[in-house]
Image (cartoon, rainbow, N blue to C red):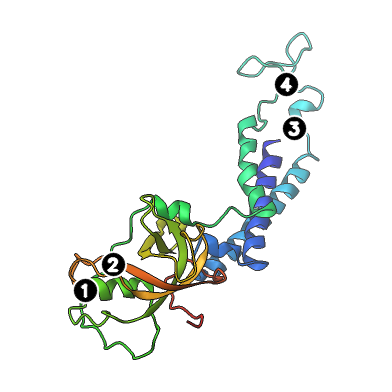
């Protein structure tokens, strides 16, 4: 019974991995794109191991042990000899009931995909510290609105002593995370270094909801936000908040690879 369970678990896990990597982009909710070949190889290996375990069980069932053929170890009175534990032929190699709970996460890969990280996670994690720009900043192009990543916008606000971002209309994209204080909301990106376990969050505090809108947008909504830096603190230093006065917000589709901090690709 134990070997049957192990083979079943291996096969289900292998099939689940192959489903989310070969037939959909679901794996991008949990790992970076570069790990796809590793996941495919792991799924194939697990599936083959499960099949091998099934064949191994079938082969072993065709050979009865010597002590089951004619009771080779019968006691002096013709009764089977008790084992070391004093049990007569009882098999205690069955799978513990609690072990069947391992099937549940495996089935989830086959039947439904666990949700991706979003506003719930971002609201409970601190913002990722933005790396210090060691080299000088390049001049900003004259494009308006200027597309920037959330990381680049933060660097420009807090580290660019030339204050090139002042008065510039920029366009940022991300998903909505509510502000618990009720003062605006956050445009957010969750970034994977390797996988969901090491994810980091970048947030831009957004004031307003764009012209013609009332109230903050719904959590986890993906948006392209056009606006200008929200003046506070001293621009070009750490006292300046990474914040935006929104002039226009546009709903966008969730990117296939959502766990990066890419430049906006939607028109402003």
Label 4 CA crowd tier, 10 Å (few <14, some 14–19, many 20+): few
What is the distance, in whole Å, between disc 3 and disc 4 at their CAs?
12 Å
Q: Which mark, residue 89?
A: 4
Instruction: Tell me if residue 125 comes above or below residue 87 in the rendering.
Output: below
The residue lying at 75 percent from left, 30 percent from top is 66
**Mark 3 or 1, nearer chain start:** 3
What is the distance, in whole Å, between disc 2 and disc 3 at their CAs?
66 Å
What is the distance, in whole Å, between disc 3 and disc 1 at their CAs?
76 Å
Badge 2 element: loop
Which of the 4 image quadrants contains residue 43? bottom right
Label 1 CA crowd tier, 10 Å (few <14, some 14–19, many 20+): many
Q: Which residue is mark 1?
A: 159
**Mark 1 or 4, nearer chain start:** 4
What is the distance, in whole Å, between disc 1 and disc 4 at their CAs?
76 Å
Q: Position of residue 89 (x, y in %)?
A: 72, 21
Badge 4 element: loop
The residue lying at 40 percent from left, 57 percent from top is 198
């Amino acid at each position: 019974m134990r070997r049957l369970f192990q083979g079943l678990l291996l096969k289900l896990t292998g099939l689940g991995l192959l489903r989310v990597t070969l037939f959909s982009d679901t794996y991008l909710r949990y790992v970076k794109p570069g790990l796809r070949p590793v996941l495919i190889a792991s799924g194939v290996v697990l599936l083959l191991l499960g099949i091998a375990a099934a064949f191994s069980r079938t082969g072993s069932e065709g050979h009865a042990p010597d002590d089951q053929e004619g009771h080779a170890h019968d006691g002096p009175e013709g009764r089977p000899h008790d084992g070391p534990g004093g049990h007569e032929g009882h098999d205690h190699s069955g799978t513990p009931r609690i072990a069947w709970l391992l099937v549940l996460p495996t089935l989830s890969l086959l039947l439904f995909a666990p949700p991706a990280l979003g506003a719930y996670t971002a609201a409970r994690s601190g913002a990722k510290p933005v790396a210090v720009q060691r080299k000088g900043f390049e001049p900003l192009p004259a494009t308006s609105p200027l597309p920037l990543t959330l990381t680049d916008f933060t660097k420009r606000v807090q580290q660019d002593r030339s204050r090139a971002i002042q008065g510039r209309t920029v366009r940022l994209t991300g998903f909505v995370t509510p502000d618990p204080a009720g003062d605006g909301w956050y445009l957010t990106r969750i970034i994977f270094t390797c996988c969901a376990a090491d994810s980091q969050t970048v947030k831009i505090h957004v004031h307003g909801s764009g012209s013609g809108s009332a109230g903050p947008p719904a959590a986890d909504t993906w948006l392209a936000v056009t606006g200008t830096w929200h003046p506070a603190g001293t621009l070009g230093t750490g006292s300046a908040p990474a914040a935006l006065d929104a002039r226009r917000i546009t709903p966008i589709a969730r990117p296939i690879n959502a766990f990066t901090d890419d430049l906006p690709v939607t028109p402003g």
